[in-house]
Image: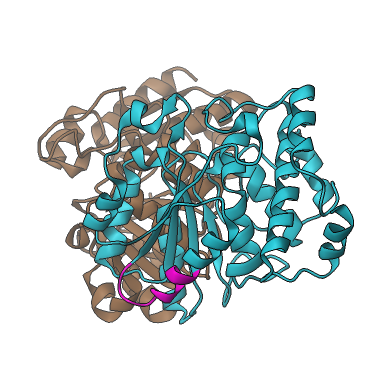
Amino acid sequence: MPAQGLLLKENLIMSDISALENISTQVRRDILRMVHKVNSGHPGGSLGCVEYFVSLFFNTMDIKVPFDMNGENEDLFFLSNGHISPVFYSVLARKGYFPVEELNTFRLIDSRLQGHPTTHEGLPGIRVASGSLGQGLSVAIGAAQSKKLNNDPKTVFVLMGDGELQEGQNWEALMYAAAKGVDNIIATVDLNGKQIDGTTDDVLHMGDVAEKFKAFGWDVLTLKEGNNVEKIIATLATAKSKLGRQKPIVILMETEMGNGVDFMMHTHAWHGKAPNDEQLENALAQNIETLGDY
Amino acid sequence: MKQYINQGSNDTRSGFGDGLTELGRTNPNVVALCADLIGSLKMQDFIDENPERFFQIGIAEANMMGIAAGLTIGGKIPFTGTFANFSTGRVYDQIRQSIAYSGKNVKICASHAGITLGEDGATHQILEDIGMMKMLPGMTVINTCDYNQTKAATLAIADFEGPVYLRFGRPKVANFTTPELGFEIGKGILLNPGNDVTIVATGHLVWEALQAAEELEANGISAEVINIHTIKPLDEEIILNSVKKTGCLVSAEEHNYLGGLGETISGLLGLKLPTPMEMVATQDTFGESGTPAQLMTKYGLDKSAIIQKVHQVIKRK
C-alpha cells in the first residue's frame, strides 16, 4: 500500500477513485499528527470533510498552482467554518501550494498555519480569514460577482458548517444570492449534526434545512454519503451541471464527524480536542501512510 | 489671519457622491455597494452611469461587508455606502475579520456620522466610530470637513491600496477648502499660522475652528489652525512642530472624547512632547433628537466651545 501511494505522489490520476481515497487517508494522518503535536485544534470536523476537500481539490476544481490571490480564470474555494483548518492546510500542502513539511508548524509561534486560516501571514491558498463564523458565504458571493464582472466563467465553491447556519449573516447572504441570481456559486453545508455544546438538534434545532434553503430560492442537492469520494464527485458534477440557471446551488452534505478513526466517530467529543500519544497511535494504525508523512 | 470663504454651503455626502461619479468614469475597477440608502449617500449618478458596477444589498450590512471583501478578489475596488452607525458598530466583526485582518482593499464610506444627523436621534447618530475603526490594525481613518475635501478624499482612496474608513456627514455646511490646499492621505493641512495656541480640528469642526480663530485674533490671541483629515495614520510632525511653537493645543471633533482625534493627539503628546491640551468633543454620552445647530451647541461642539477651551488651555501653559 505505501509503495503504491508513493508512486501516486509522482503521477496522480485524479479520476481514479482509489487514488483519491489514498490521498484522503494521508490527509487524515496529517490532521491527526498536526493536532496531536500542539495538543489543540479541531480534528472531528476536519476528518469529517476530508473526502470533500480531496474531491474538490484533486478532481472537481480547475485551479492553478502556484497561488494567485485574484484567481482569474480558475475556480475558487472559500472555507467559512475556519476551525477545520487542519484539513484545509493538509490538502493545500498536498496539492503543492506550500511544502508539506510546513504542516509541522501548525498553531506554533511564527507560523503561517494559524489556528484559523488567514491571509495575514501570506499562506498560499487562503483568500480570506475565517473562524468567526457566518462570514464565508458573503465573501464567496462577492467573489462570484467579481467573476461575473470580469466575464470569468469559472466557479466559486464555499464550505460552511451546519452549526454555523445559526449565524444570521448566512440568511442575509442566502436571500441576496437568490434575489440576484448568483448562479456561479456552489455552496456546501457540512451536515454532521454536531457543534461544540452537543448535537445541533439539542443546541438550537434548525428544523428542515433543505426546506429553508429552498424557501430562500436555492437549488438544493442532498448528499447522504458525504464521506464517499465517488458520491461526492458525482454530486459536485450534478451541481456543476446546474450552474448558470439564475439560481445559487447548495449541496447539503451529510458527513460523519471524526470519519476514519473509530473512536472519534458518532460523538461530538472530538470537535476541539486532540488525541494523546496512545490515541494517536491507535488512530494512525487505522490510516496507513500512503503518500509519505511530512 | 488667512481668509477662507464659504463658496456655497453643501453637504459632505454630496462630495462623496460626486467623487464616486467621477471614479465611475475614470476607474473601471471601482464598484459601489449600498444597503438601501442610495439617496442619502448620493450614489444615484454613479448607478445611472454604471448599473452593472452597482450592488444593491438591501438592509443587510453584514452581508454587504462580506460581499465587498469578496469583490476585491478579481481586482475590484468596492466602495460601501450606508450611515456611519451601520458602517461600523453593526458590522465590526465583519470588518475586522473579512476586511481588515484579511487585508482587503475595501473603502467603507460612512455618511450621517456624528451628532449632526440630527432629528433621527441617538439610534442613528454615532460618536464612537472613529475609535472603533482606528483600533483596527491596518485601517486608514479619514474624516473630511467639507464638500470639496470629501470629493478629493473619495478620489484619493481609490488610488490607495488597503482598507479605508471614510467618514462624512449629513447637513449642508460651509464649503471653504480649495484645490491649492491639496489632499494627501496622512498629511495634515496648516490652515492658519499662529503663535499662541494650536487648534487641531477634523470634520465639521474645522469650519468652527476657523471662525473661532478669527474671533480669537480680534481679541489678541493668535491661533494656529490645523486640519487633520486623516486620523490614522496621524501626521505627527505637523502637530509636534506646531506645539513646539505655541505650547498648547485644543482638539475639536464631532465624536466622543474617548477614542477620537483628541485621544489620538493626547497619546502622541503624552509620549513625545507633553503639552497642555483640551478637547472639544462629546463627553461620553449618546446624542438626541434636534437640529444639527441645536445639537452642536448643546453638546459643546461649536465655535464658542473652541474659544472657551482655548482660554482654558492658554492659562495652563
Q: Is residue B120 above or below residue A176?
A: above
Which of the 4 image quarters holds residue B239?
top right
Percent x, y for residue B266? 51, 27
Query: Residue B198 vs residue B51: left or right?
Result: right
| Residue B222 seen from this side | no
Chain identifier, colour cyan = A
Percent x, y for residue B252? 36, 35
Q: Is residue B240 shown in magenta?
A: no
Percent x, y for residue A254? 45, 47
- Name the residue rendered at 72%, 68% in the picture: A65
- Name the residue rendered at 55%, 65% in the picture: A233
Query: Residue B2 vs residue A46: left or right?
Result: left
Identify which residue, A6 or A78, lies in the foreground. Answer: A6
Q: Which residues are magenta?
A: A237-247
Q: How is the image coloured?
A: by chain
Identify which residue, A162 or A92, lies in the foreground. Answer: A162
Q: Is residue A191 above or below residue B256?
A: below
Which of the 4 image quarters holds residue B130?
top left
Give the drawing colour for chain B.
Answer: brown
- Name the residue rendered at 83%, 58% in the picture: A5
| Residue B185 seen from this side | yes
Query: Residue B15 vs residue B264: left or right?
Result: left
- Name the residue rendered at 30%, 34% in the picture: B127
Which of the 4 image quarters holds residue B93?
top left
Q: Is residue A82 above or below residue B108?
A: above
Percent x, y for residue A255? 50, 45
Quadrant where the N terminus of chain A sits is bottom right
Identify which residue, A139 or B141, lies in the foreground. Answer: A139
Q: Is residue A238 shown in magenta?
A: yes
Identify which residue, A193 or A162, lies in the foreground. Answer: A193
